[in-house]
Image (tube, grey):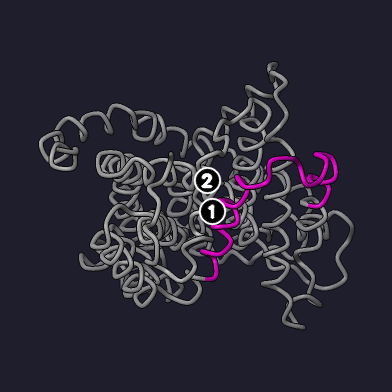
């Protein structure tokens, strides 16, 4: 059995918990080639939209009465927040599986889960913080005026440490100019809170469950309201494992995501307080895509699948490395009295595409130096932690 059952009478709803446990025990956690490719496309698309969103915020300030090309650019360049929610759903789907499998086997597997997740995060996060520091140091020396004074204020050592342990946007700001670090705090806390939640429900022994419950309650009290709201979206990815059959066909699920992204930059939604509801709807469309691909066992080969896999493998590096050099470039532009573009034309398009290509190449270079070596880094940490791991082994 995957998870250890609760004894009779421990909780009022123990029967329901045991029923859920049996459901989890019988779940198929395999990922088909079709689903793997869909996840690659989702990750690549989301990371692309995040980067172009940040480029758009740096280069453009659109006016009213836009021509068709500028209107299309406006709709495309400001989908960053929705795109992060796509990444959250995919993360919940993948990490949720690892957490459920680890919690079901107890001590050693939970220890391995902690090593896997922490090394996966820090193999990119630590270099990104250091590299970002030097990039921001150059930015401060290039910038004129007060546009980047906040960067100098956010380069303290305590802020650096706070970003390492996931306290950015909770007790400290994001480090330096690297604003996208806000979502790393979410990921770190979700990686901790979800398995602790599982242990609180299904852990072996009352003591373990009470300790897990205390850790979960403390986490809820520490983190921000936004982090908890986005946590519900992250958990939506976990729930994608429950349906055994597709809820909607693939073409309709993808169409819903396209429609959600196409309608995201609509003032009517935000002015009437429906912005977050639209973000949730976008996340649901991603969940439907995952559900629609789970039962498709057809092999996926060919150039387009290799392309999606190539771009997906360095989305994490792209997300963490691209922003400081973009801010440095923006500071250099502002030094020459740059005025943000109010429309999209040929010159603006060439600059946008050129900057996009540079940020991809730059991030891939750091991926090659850091994230590509994740497995080697993880195995090294596991080797050094072997004595501590033995403490979690059953007697």
Q: Residue furthest front?
A: 8
Quadrant in the picture for the C terminus: top left
Answer above or below: position of 184 versus 122.
below
Residue at left 41%, top 65%?
143
Q: Residues within 10 Å of mark 1 (few under 14, many from 20)?
A: few
Residue 108: x %, y % from top left: 25, 39
Residue at left 63%, top 54%?
83
Left/right placement of residue 27 relative to residue 295 reads left
Which residue lies under the disc numbered 1?
20
* Separation of marks 1 and 2 at Cα, in angstroms: 6 Å
Residue 387: x %, y % from top left: 10, 36
Which residue lies under the disc numbered 2?
24
Left/right placement of residue 25 relative to residue 236 reads left
Instruction: Residue 112: give its label.
Output: none
- Majority secondary structure of magenta residues: helix
Residue 282 counted in the magenta span: no
**Disc 1 and disc 2 in contact, CB within 8 angstroms:** yes
For numbered disc 1, what is the local secondary structure?
A: helix
Residue at left 79%, top 50%?
258
Q: Is residue 229 visible?
A: yes
């Amino acid at each position: 059995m995957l998870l250890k059952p609760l004894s009779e009478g421990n909780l009022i709803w123990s029967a329901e918990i045991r029923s859920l446990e049996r459901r989890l025990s019988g779940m198929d956690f395999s990922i088909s080639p079709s689903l793997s490719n869909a996840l690659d496309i989702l990750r690549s698309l989301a990371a692309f939209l995040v980067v172009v969103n940040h480029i758009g915020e740096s280069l453009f300030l659109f006016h009213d009465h836009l021509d068709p090309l500028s209107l299309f650019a406006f709709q495309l360049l400001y989908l960053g927040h929705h795109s992060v929610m796509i990444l959250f759903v995919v993360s919940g789907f993948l990490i949720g599986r690892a957490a459920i499998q680890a919690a079901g086997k107890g001590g050693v597997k939970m220890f391995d889960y902690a090593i896997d997740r922490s090394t996966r995060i820090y193999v990119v996060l630590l270099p990104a913080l250091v590299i970002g520091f030097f990039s921001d140091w150059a930015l401060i020396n290039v910038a004129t005026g007060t546009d980047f004074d906040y960067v100098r204020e956010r380069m303290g050592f305590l802020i650096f440490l706070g970003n390492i342990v996931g306290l950015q946007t909770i007790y400290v700001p994001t480090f330096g100019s690297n604003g996208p670090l806000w979502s790393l705090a979410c990921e770190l806390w979700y990686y901790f809170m979800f398995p602790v939640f599982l242990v609180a429900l299904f852990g072996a022994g009352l003591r373990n469950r009470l300790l897990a419950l205390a850790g979960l309650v403390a986490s809820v009290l520490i983190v921000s309201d936004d982090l908890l709201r986005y946590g519900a979206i992250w958990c939506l990815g976990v729930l994608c494992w429950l349906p055994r059959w597709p809820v909607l066909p693939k073409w309709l699920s993808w169409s819903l995501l396209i429609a959600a992204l196409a309608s995201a930059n609509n003032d009517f939604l935000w002015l009437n307080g429906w912005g977050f509801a639209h973000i949730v709807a976008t996340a649901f469309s991603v969940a439907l895509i995952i559900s629609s691909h789970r039962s498709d066992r057809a092999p996926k080969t060919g150039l387009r699948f290799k392309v999606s896999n190539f771009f997906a493998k360095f989305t994490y590096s792209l997300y963490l490395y691209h922003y400081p050099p973009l801010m440095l470039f923006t500071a250099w532009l502002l030094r020459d009295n740059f005025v943000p573009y109010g429309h999209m034309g040929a010159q603006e398009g060439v600059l946008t595409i050129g900057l996009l290509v540079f940020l991809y190449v730059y991030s891939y270079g750091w991926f090659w130096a850091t994230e590509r070596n994740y497995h080697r880094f993880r195995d090294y940490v596991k080797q050094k932690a072997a004595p501590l791991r033995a403490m979690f082994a059953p007697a």
